[in-house]
Amino acid sequence: MPRHRKERSRAGADFYWRYLVPATFIVLWSAGYTFAKLGLAHAGVATLLALRYGLVVIVLLPLFWMLRPPLPVRTADWVHVAVVGFFIQVVFFGFTWSALTMGVSAGTAALIFSLQPILVGLLAPRLTREQVGVRRWAGLALGLSGAALVIFSRSAVDISSAVGICFCVIAVLGMTAATLYEKRFGVSQHLVTSNLIQCGVGFVVFVPLAWVFEGMRVEWTGELFVALGFVVFFNSLISITLLLAMIRRRGAAPVSSLFFLVPPTAALIAWVLLGETMPALAWAGVALATVGVAIASQPAAAGKAG
């Protein structure tokens, strides 16, 4: 291939991974909280998650049969994929959705979840040998400040449920563990394979929980179908796939910094779709978080630590 074509192809891939993929992930991930809350009005946490993962498996099985993607070769590879799936699909989503049903406001949850990039930044050097330098820490600090500014300016913080807040903390720890585990032990698997295994883990865990504790009770309404459609296709099939792909390609710390944009993006979505207010301070927070993420997600220069 001529040199100029290689450079053009490299530039296109760089734009794709640095801008298009992160933007798509943030929008879909942020909107997921709204649709989850919509679905939880008609089904219990375990029941809704069991339905979610069951539907994902149903969608992926025909694709798996047609594409015949390779399966993990070693037993350890199966375990690595399943462990990441457990931390994300069971711990993160299970405790996050439970916290929402306990009255924890979306703003409070978002503020706690904004701590995840800080935890990854603290643990990554020791657990994944990924260095987080001064520049990246400055970006993380700006990102956290911007996310907090958006949340507090919209008066979206409520600490009335201590148990719910504890559940949010456990969810953050689950996502942190998944991010670091994927970076250290994750091996490249076909997207259909990894999604099928991980959502299969979620299905196996939540079906008995839904049966025993919730009786698998469901109100079959239009809202429920809309919510399920979103969390199945856009959260489980697209968002998680993009997240794991970015972690493998770019590293745990820079990808985790994207979570600072979740509160601002969720606020913007609510502003556009629900007419919720966006004070001037909230817009300033959006700008600050965006600048922070831009700094924290920049690739480290050769020979330097982020």
Image (cartoon, grey):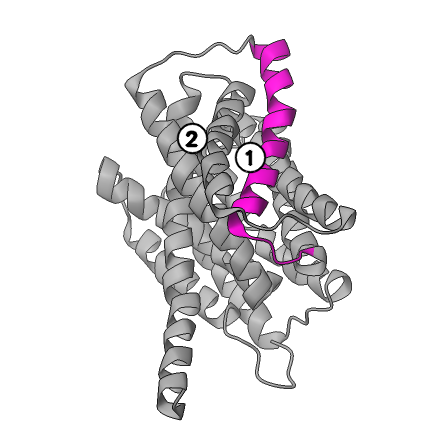
- Residue that mark 2 sits on: 36
- Residue at 56% over, 35% down: 199
- Residue at 34% over, 59% down: 284
- Residue 159 position, x and y percent, is 54, 32
The reply to whether dot 2 and dot 1 touch (C-beta < 8 Å) is no
User: 77 or 218: which is nearer to us?
Assistant: 77
- Residue 178 position, x and y percent, is 65, 48
Q: Is 253 placed above or below 14 here? A: above
- Residue that mark 1 sits on: 93
Identify the magenta region: 186-214
Give the amino acid type for the residue marked by disc 1 in the picture: Phe
**Left or right of 290 in this view: 78:** right
Could you give the CA–CA distance between mark 2 and mark 1, rounded to whole angstroms?
Answer: 10 Å
User: 32 or 71: which is nearer to us?
Assistant: 71
**Left or right of 56 in this view: 166:** right
Helix, strand or loop under label 1: helix
| Picture quarter with the N terminus | bottom left
Helix, strand or loop under label 2: helix
| Picture quarter with the C terminus | bottom right
Q: Is residue 152 magenta?
A: no
Q: Is 187 placed above or below 6 here? A: above
